[in-house]
Amino acid sequence: MLFGGSHNRIVGMFADQFELEGSRWLYRRSQKGEAFAVSEDERSRFIDEFARRLRRFFWLWVAVILAMTCAGVGYTVANDLELEESWIWAGVALLAYPYWISWRRLWGAPQEVLQRRPALAPSRTWTEARRARLAKMSWGQLVIAVASVGLLIWTRSHEHNLLVGWDRLWLVLGAATALGAAWTAFDKWRLTSRR
């Protein structure tokens, strides 16, 4: 997550919650919540704080997962037990909810500060939020999404017969991704052709 461009991409997605409208910045949680006015300085502070907290968040969860793994392995070795797959899934389930809650708090930190102010606009409808996301999405991102899944399926086809058994799900994944990308491209084309 923090290596390469992943950290910068996540921070960029966070920054997309701030939209420049005329000469002022508006914050909308996940690009669809109520709109709150923020200054350029506030926007920069929120983004910088998110980037710092994201690093801590990542390393904290690495430490938690390592501690749980070591505790689980240590317990099974000390008691001469076999590590069952159900225990692994139980550990994942045990961590999923706290991870999700802490991620939502991190992502929505500006909302907690700004909700004391009056909102300048109500939350967007699903259609309005989709239109805003599509406006920020590039055609290249759509092509990369389809190409990535196509490459994944192609590499899987060298290891497995994709026309037999459960491996057919790879073809379903590819078809669903292609259909989703085609629908998104059509929506984006409709949006850009109306301008």
Image (cartoon, rainbow, N blue to C red):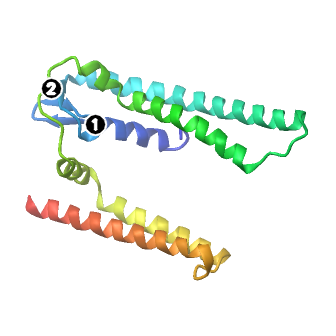
Q: Residue furthest bottom?
A: 163
Rendered location of residue 48, percent (x, y): 38, 25
- Quadrant of the drawing holding the C terminus: bottom left
Rendered location of residue 159, percent (x, y): 67, 74
**Pointer 2 local density, CA inside 10 Å: few below 14, some 14–19, many at least 20:** some
* Mark-to-mark CA distance, 1 and 2: 15 Å
The answer, for residue 156, to whether it is visible in the render is yes
Q: Quadrant of residue 11?
A: top left
* Count of numbered circles in the view: 2
**Pointer 1 local density, CA inside 10 Å: few below 14, some 14–19, many at least 20:** many
Residues 6 and 173: in front is 173
Query: What element does badge 1 sit on?
Result: loop
Q: Name the residue rendered at 23%, 52% in the picture.
A: 130
- The tag on residue 116 is none
Using the image, determine if residue 66 lies above or below residue 83: above
Using the image, determine if residue 137 lies above or below residue 157: above
- The tag on residue 17 is 1
Rendered location of residue 184, percent (x, y): 28, 63
Left or right of 82, for residue 4:
left
Q: Which residue is mark 2?
A: 119
Q: Earlier in the sequence, mark 1 or mark 2?
A: 1
Q: Amino acid at mark 1?
A: Gln
The answer, for residue 44, to whether it is visible in the render is no
Q: Name the residue rendered at 37%, 66% in the picture.
A: 143
